[in-house]
Image (cartoon, rainbow, N blue to C red):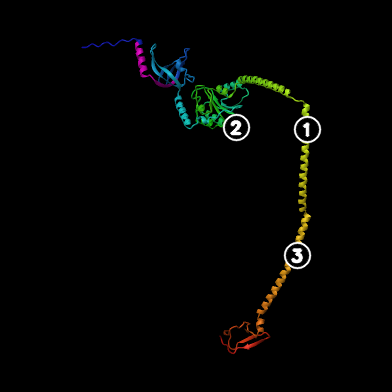
Amino acid sequence: MTTQEPPQTLSVSQLNGLAKQLLEDCFAQVNVTGELSTLSRPSSGHWYFTLKDDRAQIRCAFFKGKNMRVNFNPEPGQQVSVRGKVSLYEGRGDYQLIVDSMQQAGAGALALAFEKLKQELLAAGWFDPEHKKPLPATIKHVAVVTSPTGAAIHDILSVFKRRWPTMQISVLPVLVQGNNAAGQIANAIAQANHWVRTKQQDFDVILVSRGGGSLEDLWPFNEHIVAAAIHDSELPVISAVGHEVDFSISDFVADIRAATPSAAAELLSPDQTELISKLHLLKGRLAKSQQLRLRRWQEQLLSLSRRVRDPRSQLREQSQRLDYLELRLQRQWQQSQRRRQQRLGAANQQLSLLNPQRQLNNKQRDLSQLRKRMVNAIKQNLKQNKAASLNLEQQLRNLGPEQTLNRGYSIIQDTSGQIINNADQLSTDQELRAKFSQGTAKLLVKSSTAM
């Protein structure tokens, strides 16, 4: 019968060390979601808290080097998602989670939605440099789309007051977080453009801004409606949303992205101290330039004064030139007078030819001649027509029945007056009437023979 070796006896620290190694090997990377509880932050900078749900809880340690990357302020009662490894605190034998990162619960879904919209707008070309509008050379009026009570507007106004107090600022008040924020932001951008188009305002640029916050707080600036309003804006749009490490869809679509609201105000405002310094420098340069120019003029004046001639000689030359010009003017005036007289004579001659009385006399003479020619033509025409009429009358008379009867012929008619020109028209004992050149006679048909 074999005897069994008794199990190895471990110290408590050895057991906890083996358990820690086993847990870290098996659960080197886990994601856990739960409710924050008993959060403590000692002076070391580490965070210690408990994650719990309705059935269990686990202690967590979030060390300083890691928790500095959290972009929100965790509070007990918040739902969070953490990533880390399962371990064991050997000193107490407590099972715990060593956290590497933390984000608010649901932020993972928002991050996916952010990335999806970003890729869609990138493919549509909304981020392309050719769509970016440059800022005007001179900016006098800025429309700020932000919350009127947030930290962003105070930072913006502070920077403008310090750097360029004359800048005109118009705040278009909107919500910057919550369900209704995106619609208000998009409407404010569209309204600013409408006011400029209708000349109700003279905005030079639109500044869309808010302070830092969690991804959920900044989400209105990741909505498609806000991106579309920025893309369609005719005015240049600057996006200054969150802190320097925060990026939003509006940053990518905007014409310029500023890291912070204060950085945006500095971008839009020249530094008056720097401008005053430049002004003094330019003033000095101008004074030096004027002195140099004055010195050159003095030298030129000195040189000219040495070349000045006796003024009496110049007066004589001017007098001679004046006499020459006077004689030349007289000749030109005489020539001009002759030309005018010639034109006047020609005009008088032409006017005499166009005298209305002379033209009327010519027309009356022509009318008298035409009247005589017309009377002679009418007389000649009447004479010719009369001769032709007499000729036709004679021809008619020669061809008439009287001339035929005078030559010994007669006209035979029946009692109804119908002329008989054929024997077939006659019948025996028919009464007829014969017309001669002198008188008529009644006839009675005894017989007829047709030819």
* Pair 1/3: label in front: 1
The residue singled out by tag 2 in the image is: 196
Magenta-drawn stretch contains 32: yes
Is the C terminus in the top left, top right, bottom left or bottom right quadrant? bottom right
Q: CA distance from mark 1 to mark 2?
A: 69 Å
- Residue assigned mark 1: 320
Q: Please name which of the two marks, 2 or 3, marks the residue nearer to the observer.
A: 3
Residue at left 78%, top 33%? Answer: 322
**Which sits in the foreground, 105 or 247?**
247
Expressed as whole percent of the image width and height from the top left, the position of residue 439 reads 68, 86
Q: Is residue 73 above or below residue 350?
A: above
Q: Residue 18 magenta-drawn?
A: yes
Whole-percent x and y of residue 142? Answer: 59, 27
Q: Is residue 262 left or right of residue 32?
A: right
Task: Report, in whole angstroms, how far the alpha carbon at label 1 lies from the one at label 3.
Answer: 77 Å
- Say what secondary structure mark 3 lies in: helix
Dot 2 or dot 3, earlier in sequence: 2
Amino acid marked by disc 1: Gln
In the picture, the quarter occupied by the N terminus is: top left
Please name the amino acid that badge 2 sits on. Val
Residue type for callout 3: Lys
Count residues near mark 1 (Cα–Cα under 10 Å), then give few for <14, some for 14-19, many for 20+: few
Res 365 → quadrant: bottom right
Task: Tell which circle, 1 or 3, labels the residue nearer the N-terminal end.
Answer: 1
Determine which quarter of the picture holds residue 97. Answer: top left
Point out which mark residue 372 bears: 3
Q: Are marks 1 and 2 in contact (CB under 8 Å)?
A: no
Magenta extent: 14-35
Residue 87 appears in view: yes
Q: Earlier in the sequence, mark 1 or mark 2?
A: 2
Instruction: Please give left or right for residue 256 compared with residue 25 in the image.
Output: right
